[in-house]
Amino acid sequence: MSSNPSNSRRGFTLVELLVVIAIIGVLIALLLPAVQQAREAARRMSCQNNLKQLGLALHNYHDTNKCLPYGWNNLEASWHAAILPQMELNNLFETLIWQEGGDGNWNSGSANEAACATYIDGYRCPSMAIPKAVDNNSIEGRVPGSYLCVASSLALGNTNSNVSSGEVHLGMYKQDGVMYGLSSTRFADVVDGLSNTVAIGETYTDPDEARDGNAMDHWYIGAPQTGGWNATDTGQNSGTEFCEVAGSMNVVMNAALDPSISGVVAQLAFGSYHPGGAQFVLCDGSVRFVPQTIDFNTYRALGSRNGREVIGSY
């Protein structure tokens, strides 16, 4: 009696293997955007938490000093330095040297330069896709920042050489925002309402992105190029590059990403690495995501503390 032929194992054919690979590829293509969106959502939430802490720090500073911090002072320190104690970074604050010249310079190799090169999670959006430290303006390992104070709803440049006659620039004393050069704004001065006025916002930072000789570079704690600035009601103050620490809401959001907008103007803009808009801290301490499609007049009105505008929905 003849035996039956033994059963042989049947493997995948080349066509079947290619079909499986194609299916896996399709699944990856479908899942990857979802994973990326989830990661971005987590980064945006972390950024929102940073801004909430900044809002709380502003309120604590106001409780202690009866006013909000200056945007920058005449020793080239920024509002980021002023609120270090309220950010639970008093040890770093105590290292700062408050003098003009010598070790008080921010690029002198002293403790002030070391502070500018200190990485602080709360001053950086996790979505910002640039190095954590950059050699800049004679500061080794200077750390880029993600958040600017709102100095103005009118400014279109850093200095009077950047703007046309009669236009507002950040070098002017007494802006209509809440934090500018040597400002001491009280909550009582915010007549438009704390929930209708922005104090701090995100910005699109990239020191390698430059137009017309103006880089989209934003930093924290010290701003050496603001040196010599002083409070006068008329004329041009000394210094420049106030946009390293402060911005204007008279510039469309994410202007840094629009090559048709002059770098002189774009460097003052708020914006972000998040798609669709940016996050802002209102004077009441709340955080709002503002869409890039917001009506520009509404957007600009949010930057004024005393314009008496009626803010619609956004």
Image (cartoon, grey):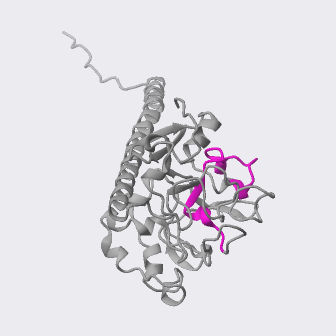
Q: Is residue 289 above or below residue 233?
A: above
Quadrant of the drawing holding the N terminus: top left
- Residue 121, position as x, y percentages in the image: 38, 60
The residue depicted at 45 percent of the width and 30 percent of the height is 21
Is residue 286 inside the magenta stretch? no
Q: Is residue 1 left or right of residue 266?
A: left
Residue at 73%, 69% in the rendered image = 235
Q: In x, y percent, where is residue 248?
A: 61, 52
**Is 25 on the left-hand or right-hand side of 169?**
left
Residue 4 in the image: x percent, y percent?
23, 13
Indicate yes or no whether the magenta region holds residue 255.
yes
Q: Nearer the viewer, residue 151 or 119?
A: 151
Q: Quadrant of residue 74?
A: bottom right
Q: Quadrant of residue 211?
A: bottom right
Specify the farthest residue to the left.
Answer: 1
* Residue occupying the far right of the picture: 165
Q: Nearer the viewer, residue 264 or 306?
A: 306
Residue 229 location, x and y as percent?
62, 74
The answer to whether residue 126 of the structure is visible from this angle is no
Residue interval drawn in magenta = 239-265
**On the rendered structure, is 156 left or right of 22?**
right
Instruction: Find the residue positioned furthest to the top.
Output: 1
Give whichever of 93, 169 is nearer the camera.
169
Name the residue located 48 percent from the left edge and 58 percent from the top edge: 185
Q: Residue placed at 64% from the left, 61% from the top?
A: 170
* Above/below status of 18 relative to 172: above
